[in-house]
Amino acid sequence: MPDSEHYDVIIIGAGAAGLMCAITAGQRGRKVLMLEKSNKVGKKILMSGGGRCNFTNQYIEAENYLSQNPHFCKSALSRYTQWDFIELVNKHGIRYHEKTHRDNDGEEIHKGQLFCDESSKQILAMLLSESEQAGVEIKTRCEIESVECDNGFRLTSNLGEWHCESLVVASGGLSIPSLGGSGFGYDLARQYGMNILQHRAGLVPFTLSGELKEMTSRLSGLAMHVEISCQQQCFNEELLFTHRGLSGPAVLQISSYWHPGDSIAIDLLPGKDIADILQQEKSMNGKSLLRTVLAKYLPKKLVTECEAMWWKKYQQTSLAEIPDTKITDVASQLSAWTIKPSATEGYRTAEVTLGGVDTNDLSSQTMESKTRPHLYFIGEVVDVTGHLGGYNFQWAWSSGYVAGLNA
C-alpha cells in the first residue's frame, strides 16, 4: 500500500474538537488525516451564535457541565483553558466582544460570553489556517464504511482505505442532523466494548399542547427576562414565546435538566416581591385594575393572557375590592408559573446531545479509550455537555487539545 495511505493519526469529524485535535497533533510532527462526511468542515462553528460564534466563556468551571462524572472534564479544561483559546484568537487578529445582557429593568448582566465582532467564518478560517500550517490533510464527503483493528486501525470508506496508529472520534452527537449529527461515534465505541449512556436532546426549545400552545402562539415573538427552574436548577435568562411553545436562552438552559413528565417553574418578575408591590398598589391606588398595575412591569400582551388564566372573574374589579387572598394567589402564579411541557423539539433543533460515551471508559488525562489503546473520543460524542454560552466550544477545544497531545 502506498505510504500516502498510512497516517499517524486519523480523526473522524472535522468540527471544533476534531480541528483542535488535528492542529495539536500536527504541531507535534504527527502525520494527520481528518475525515468529514459533510461537504464542508466546521458547519456548527459557522452557524453558532447567530453567525458570530460564541467561541468560549470567561468563566469556565466544571459546574457549567453536565456529566455522570462531574469531575471528568476538569483535567482537560485546566490543560487548555479559555485564555489559551483567546490567545489564539488574538494571534490571528480576530476582534471580539463580551455580549452584554439586560434584565427587565435595563440593568446590564455580564455572563462572560465571547463573540466575534464580525463573523464565525473568522474562527473557522483561523482553525483551517493552523491546520494547514501543521500539515493536516482534510477530506470531505467521506462516508466511513468500516473500522477494523489490524496492527493499528484500518478504515474503509467511499474515498478509499487508510491505516493509522491512532484513531480519534470527533463525530459529534445526534443534534442538528442537517449539519451532520449522527450516532456513528456511539456505534464505534460499542464496537470496542465501551458503554454508551442514554442520550437525549439538550439546549432545546420546549413544545406545549392545548390551550398553553394556543396562548404561546398568540404571544409568539415576545421575549422577556425570567427566572426558570426545574430539578433544583435555576437560570436567570431571556425567555421567548414561540408558535410551538417556549424557547430563548432560559428555556434552552433548563431543557438540559428537564425529563419528560417534569414541570418547570417560571418567575415572570425575578428579583421583585410582586405580592408586596400589589398590596402597596392596593392601598395607594385602590381604584386601579390589576392589569393596569401589572402592565407597568410586564408586557401588555402577556398581562392580557395572564388575566384570562388567573383572574378572569376580577377583570373589571378594582384592586381595593379584590380579596387579599386572591392578590396573594395571583402574585404566587406570576412568581412561580408552573408549566408541564409536552416535549422538546428534539434533535432537529437541539444545540447539543446529552449523554454519550461513558467517561468511565476514557482517561480524563488523554481522552483515550480504556478498552482499546490508541482510540480516542472527544467533544460532543462524550458524556460531557456544557451550559449555553460558549461552554461546549471550550470543551471541544480542551478535549481536542489533550487528545492531540497524546494521539
Image (cartoon, rainbow, N blue to C red):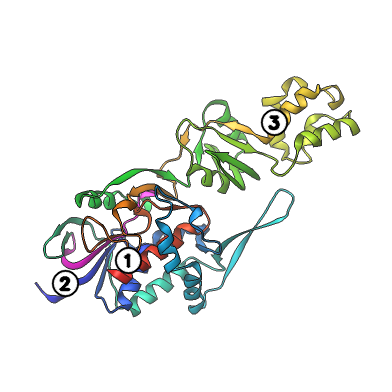
With 51 as the anchor, is 19 left or right in this view? left
Helix, strand or loop status at disc 3 = helix
The amino acid sitting under disc 3 is Ser
Camera-side residue of 164 and 120 = 164
Query: Is residue 171 a member of the stretch shown in magenta?
Result: yes
Task: Give me the disc on residue 6.
Answer: 2
Query: Is residue 1 a member of the stretch shown in magenta?
Result: no
Count residues near mark 3 (Cα–Cα under 10 Å), then give few for <14, some for 14-19, many for 20+: some
With 97 as the anchor, is 384 left or right in this view? left
Q: Are marks 2 and 1 in contact (CB under 8 Å)?
A: no
Image coordinates of residue 122 in percent, x first then y, are 47, 70
The amino acid sitting under disc 1 is Ala
Of the image marks 2 and 1, the number of the one nearer the N terminus: 2
Q: Nearer the viewer, mark 2 or mark 3?
A: 3
Image coordinates of residue 19 in percent, x first then y, are 36, 67
Helix, strand or loop status at disc 2 = strand
Of the image marks 3 and 1, the number of the one nearer the N terminus: 3
Of the image marks 2 and 3, the number of the one nearer the N terminus: 2
The residue segment tinted magenta is: 158-177
The amino acid sitting under disc 2 is His
Q: Nearer the viewer, mark 2 or mark 1?
A: 1
With 290 as the anchor, is 79 left or right in this view? left
Which residue position is annotated with label 3?
332
Which residue position is annotated with label 1?
403
* Up-down relation of residue 134 to residue 228 (above or below): below
